[in-house]
Image: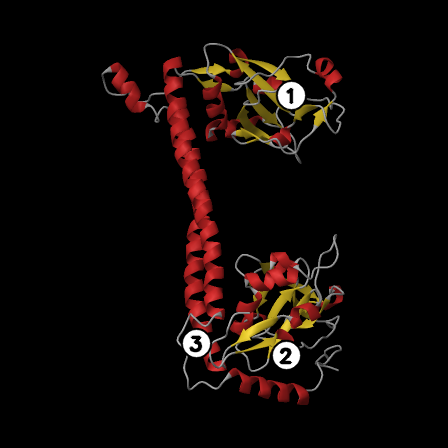
Amino acid sequence: MSELPKGWTVAPLGEVCGQPAQRVPSADEDFTYIDIASIDRERKVISEPQRLPGAEAPSRARKVVEKGDVIVSMTRPNLNAVALIGEEHNECIASTGFDVLKPIEVEPRWIFAAVRSAQFVDAMCDKVQGALYPAVKSADIREYEIPLPPVAEQTRIAAKLDELLAQVDTLKARIDGIPALLKRFRQSVLAAAVSGRLTEEWRSAARKGPEDQGFAYPLRRLGLLARFIDYRGKTPEKVDSGIPLITAKNIRPGYISREPREFIRPEAYEGWMTRGIPQVGDVLITTEAPLGNVAVIDIKEMFALAQLAICLQFNESFLSSFAAIALQSPLLQEELVRRSTGTTVKGIKASVLKEIDLPAPSIDEQTEIVRRVEQLFAFADQLEAKISEAKTRIDRLTQSILAKAFRGELVPQDPDDEPASALLERIQARRASAPKARRGRRKTENA
């Protein structure tokens, strides 16, 4: 550890934190249970604790937490499931999967800052044991050494951290809301594309006059526009390597993912693909689980098509790229759902899909629509990439702020502060005289 500011010292967490009391919930009480899943790992807060009757208490429900305690998950420390206990969770019961740190004369927010730092996470990851259930021990956590400022400075630093990290959280919330806005933007673009609004000015310029009121594209049946290559109802034999198999799982909204990777035997390809060979530029649509994912084929290598997906090969009067836009639009997606059948899993038959009407602009206008949609989607993609970069920078900002705090650079030092060494002496004396943590079952009011 680098040189510490004057008046600071170093101490293991176990030296400045006590142990929690433990008890078994009474069968006739209701209690709030905090398990690992209750922690919002991004915000480092308790977000979804359970309310349980004592008779149904899990065997791990034992550790009593109080305001000011800091809980640290001992399983999968890389996920850093930590939280500071507030008034609303005072005297709740936490899982034994947590180490409960009870600060002794130390600012709880300082302990909380220490256990959410990258240095703490890295140190715990180095001590992980077990592959299927990676975890650290309470002793590993409590042996971790933290810089310890004078208690007055701890309070000043904690207040500054609250201020700065609240600003970071506000930035995160704003950034996190942008993907939903972009999703709505893309849906609006698709809706405008099939309604005629996207190319309204283009049509007016072409006609040298204003747009007709009540304009709507003519409609044509999908079954008349495209040839259907359908392999539903059959499951090919899958092998570890060979010719790639594209299933409904690979067809995502607007693109084809190569994950999961599945294959069929090369010698089985011709016998399997008897109904037709998908080509680059054709449109794939899923008919069930999930329903209505649409993507244009961009795979140049040979591949096989599995069940629950249909390949649409459009005739020369209709652009497949425009068809993909139309089929992804809210209007057509709603139509797919409306015509689907099934209770648990919704699906649509090929015969029903053929009866769906698609808007049918002229080829020239289809070309213009595709150009504009691709341009607007490219803008959204660029913005998403910038958002991803911004999120990375914000995550680094949190750790940068914490690092400055631990170096004593966040607030000025006060030479009149009692040195941390005196604080440690008091803590050691208090620990020596403190009774052991209580264990057992809480008495009921009538007991």
Report how many numbered discs are placed on residues in the image: 3
- Most distant residue in the top direction: 316
Which residue, given by chain and number where applicable, does mark 2 sit on? 15
| Label of residue 303 in the image | 1
**Dot 3 amino acid type:** Arg
Eye-nearest disc, 2 or 1: 2
* Residue at position x 76%, y 65% in the image: 59
Give the image location of residue 373, x and y in percent.
40, 27
Residue 372 position (above or below residue 118)? above
Would residue 200 be found to the left or right of residue 48 on screen?
left
Residue 205 position (above or below residue 251)? above
Which residue, given by chain and number where applicable, does mark 3 sit on? 156
- Most distant residue in the front direction: 3
**Dot 1 amino acid type:** Phe
How far apart are the alpha carbons under marks 3 and 1? 63 Å
Give the image location of residue 109, x and y in percent.
52, 72
**Dot 2 amino acid type:** Glu
